Image: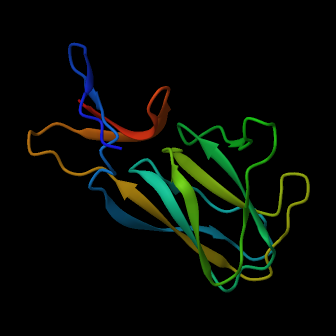
Amino acid sequence: MALRRKRKEETSDTKATATPLGEPNMSLQVLEGPTIVAGQSMSNVLDCNAGNIVRVNIPPEFTGSQLTFRVSTEGQHYHDVYDMRGEEVTLNAVPGTTVYTQNPVLPVGFLKFRSGTSKKPSNQSAEVKFSVVIQTPPESSSGTTQYWLYAFVPGYGWMWLQAER
């Protein structure tokens, strides 16, 4: 369903446009990491500030079946990730595969992977280096920075929202 009407809000330095006319022209970028070292269950940090996570590549060396996550906005204080039902967000990870996220995951800032869950972590027997694919916003011809967000808008459903600064 195409929406002909656009909603705009303007402030002194930001304007936002909402339209469900399809996905924006986003670029994909592969981020190498994070890595879980042998004998550990928690990875090092991966900076995901450049975009939205769309898939996670699980290396063949990974042992176990679940990945859970810790995130931080500023890279200092990390928190386990839970959904709105109070359940830990868990990715079923099959070694040597790629897992697509259902919808692009909003920018998380800084990300750590955990093998297993917060209650039952699982140490890796060998070093495991993941890669994460993110969608990055398109370059703007007007010299402004564009930000994209996939959000639910009452009356319209799920749609991409764009803001320029």
Residue in front for this viewpoint, 160 or 96: 160
Above or below: residue 18 compared with residue 100: above
In screen coordinates, is 116 left or right of 108?
right
Residue in front for this viewpoint, 62 or 37: 62
Above or below: residue 115 compared with residue 151: below
Image quadrant holding the C terminus, namely: top left
Residue 140 location, quadrant: top left
Residue at the front extreme of this rendering: 1
Residue occupying image coordinates x 53% and y 44%: 108
In screen coordinates, is 103 left or right of 29?
right
Residue in front for this viewpoint, 111 or 164: 164
Residue occupying image coordinates x 79% and y 47%: 88
Asked if residue 58 shows in the view, the reply is no
Image quadrant holding the N terminus, namely: top left
In screen coordinates, is 117 left or right of 70?
right
Above or below: residue 164 compared with residue 49: above
Residue occupying image coordinates x 75% and y 77%: 38
- Give how far across and how far down residue 110 sits, in percent: 54, 48
Residue at the left extreme of this rendering: 142
